[in-house]
C-alpha cells in the first residue's frame, strides 16, 4: 500500500541545540534504514520550509502507523497521511 506522508518539523524550545541535534541524527539513521528496506520510497524537502513530502510503501495501515510512531522526531512534527492508488492514466 502506498501513502503520501507530509511532515512539518516544529523544533521544541525546551531542548538544547545539542539535544535536538542528537534526535535529528537518530531520525536520519532511521530514515536511511527505511529507504534501504524500500519502505520510505521518496523523501523530498519542501522548498523554503522545515518540512518534507514522502512516499511510503507499507503492508497495511498498521505497518504505516508503527513506522511513523517510531520516528524519533515524531513528537516534534505535524504529520498528514494520504492514501494513494493507481491513476488510470499512469503507464507504470
Ligand atoms: O527534516 C525533516 O524533514 C524530517 C526528517 C525526515 C527524515 C529525516 O532524516 O528528517
Image: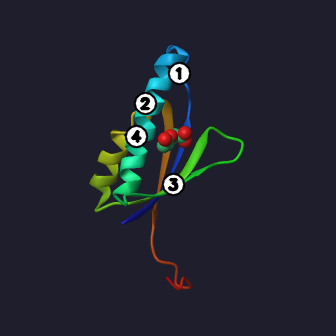
Examine the rendered structure and indicate whether residue 78 appears above or below residue 61: above
Q: Nearer the viewer, residue 66 or 16?
A: 16
Give the Cα distance between marks 3 and 2.
Answer: 18 Å
Look at the numbered disc 4 and give the secondary structure of its residue: helix
The residue drawn where x is 38% and y is 42% is 30
Give the Cα distance between marks 2 and 4.
Answer: 17 Å
Q: Read off the residue under disc 4.
A: 29
Name which of mark 4 and mark 1 comes first in the sequence.
Answer: 1
**In the rendering, which numbered label is found on residue 54?**
3
**Picture quarter with the N terminus:** bottom left
Decide if residue 65 is in sight here: yes
Examine the rendered structure and indicate whether residue 15 appears above or below residue 79: above
Name which of mark 3 and mark 1 comes first in the sequence.
Answer: 1
**In the rendering, which numbered label is found on residue 75?**
2
- Asked if disc 2 and disc 1 are in contact, CB closer than 8 Å, the reply is yes
Give the Cα distance between marks 3 and 1.
Answer: 22 Å
Q: Residue 8, how many percent across, how many down?
A: 56, 39
Crowding at label 3, few (<14), some or many (≥20) Cα neighbours within 10 Å? some
Amino acid at each position: 500500500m502506498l501513502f503520501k506522508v507530509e511532515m512539518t518539523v516544529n523544533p521544541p524550545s525546551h531542548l538544547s541545540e545539542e539535544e535536538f541535534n542528537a534526535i535529528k541524527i537518530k531520525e536520519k539513521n532511521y530514515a536511511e534504514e527505511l529507504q534501504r528496506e524500500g519502505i520510505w520510497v521518496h523523501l523530498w524537502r519542501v522548498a523554503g520550509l522545515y518540512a518534507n513530502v514522502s512516499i511510503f510503501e507499507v503492508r497495511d495501515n498498521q505497518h504505516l502507523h508503527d513506522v511513523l510512531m517510531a520516528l524519533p522526531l515524531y513528537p516534534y512534527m505535524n504529520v498528514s497521511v494520504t492514501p494513494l492508488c493507481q491513476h488510470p492514466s499512469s503507464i507504470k
